[in-house]
Image (spheres, grey):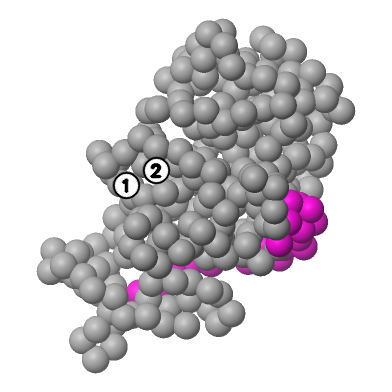
Amino acid sequence: MATNIPMSETTASWVRDVLDGRAEPAVPRHAATVMLVRPAVPAGPGVQVYLLRRVPTMEFAPGAFVFPGGRVDDRDADHAVRWSGPAPDYWARRFAVPEPLARALVCAAVRETFEESGVLLAGPSAHEVVADTRGADWEADRAALIDRSLSFAEFLDRRGLVLRTDLLRPWSQWITPLVEPRRYDTRFFAAALPEGQQTRDVGGEADRVAWLRPEDAVAGWDRSELRMLPPTVATLRELAACGSLEGVMAAEREIIPIEPELRVKNGRYRLVVPDGIDYPL
């Protein structure tokens, strides 16, 4: 699928330099993002997904609605992280990466979700999950994780918790186009909101949070009311098609790296993705 896209002259100059080999493309940074999903409220068909709006001052995707997530921290691969559920080798196979990176991606997914939503996919045992993460002590730990004065392994150990990888489902992999100056290789995960836990407006990188039905979020994007990156819109459409929380968590996903490619044809820039990918622009 290909789509013509508008572009400023400054951006077009950079794109030409990259495409012609005069500029070195940025190396994608590994990242993880989580779609937190719950049954629709009030009760009804479908699901709701947690979205946050990035503050306008952010260098990447300012003002865009996104799922919780962020870059992998070197310490996310720490073997000291308490682990329960599918082992790193399972995630390595699903994402076709070495085990250390698989471990880091899963830890980053859970850590970033806690940092950006207050939801923690961990518990005191392999069969339990934290009931509530509100309170000054939890907030202090969250802030320490954000400023990197506390590692994720230290955080779990301090509280006697294990990472519940069984609460995550692998979903997809999107790579920022080659010509972008800031690039990410992002693995998407799905997770059900744990019973008893609540998301909260934690501030920082976001100035607004919302639980929305995926189809309503896409409709808002169609009306230019919600700004979102195309991979977010594509993922929302996939979630909506599942029809229920059970459908989301039971979805069989083949993880194929998706990297939109920018091409020039007849003087126009065209963003090309593999056939069968619903990539909106």
Mark 2, Cα crowd under 10 Å, few <14 / some 14-19 / many 20+, is many
In the rendered image of this protein, does residue 99 appear above or below residue 241?
A: above
Residue 119 pos. (x, y %): 61, 29
- Which comes before the other along the chain, label 1 or label 2? 2
The amino acid type found where label 2 is placed reads Arg
* The residue positioned farthest toward the bottom in the image shown: 266
Q: Which of 6/78 is in front?
A: 6
The amino acid type found where label 1 is placed reads Gly
In the rendered image of this protein, does residue 67 appear above or below residue 1?
A: above
Q: Please tell me whether residue 245 belongs to the stretch shown in magenta.
A: yes
Mark 1, Cα crowd under 10 Å, few <14 / some 14-19 / many 20+, is some
Q: Secondary structure at mark 1?
A: loop
Count how many numbered circles sit on residues in the image.
2
Instruction: Specify whether residue 182 is in view.
Output: yes
Q: Please tell me whether residue 200 belongs to the stretch shown in magenta.
A: no
Residue occupying image coordinates x 76% and y 58%: 247
Residue 216 pos. (x, y %): 51, 59
Q: Quadrant of residue 137?
A: top right
What residue span does the magenta drawing correspond to?
A: 243-263
Q: Which of 163/231 is in front?
A: 231
Residue denoted by label 1:
63
Residue denoted by label 2:
53
Q: Secondary structure at mark 2?
A: strand
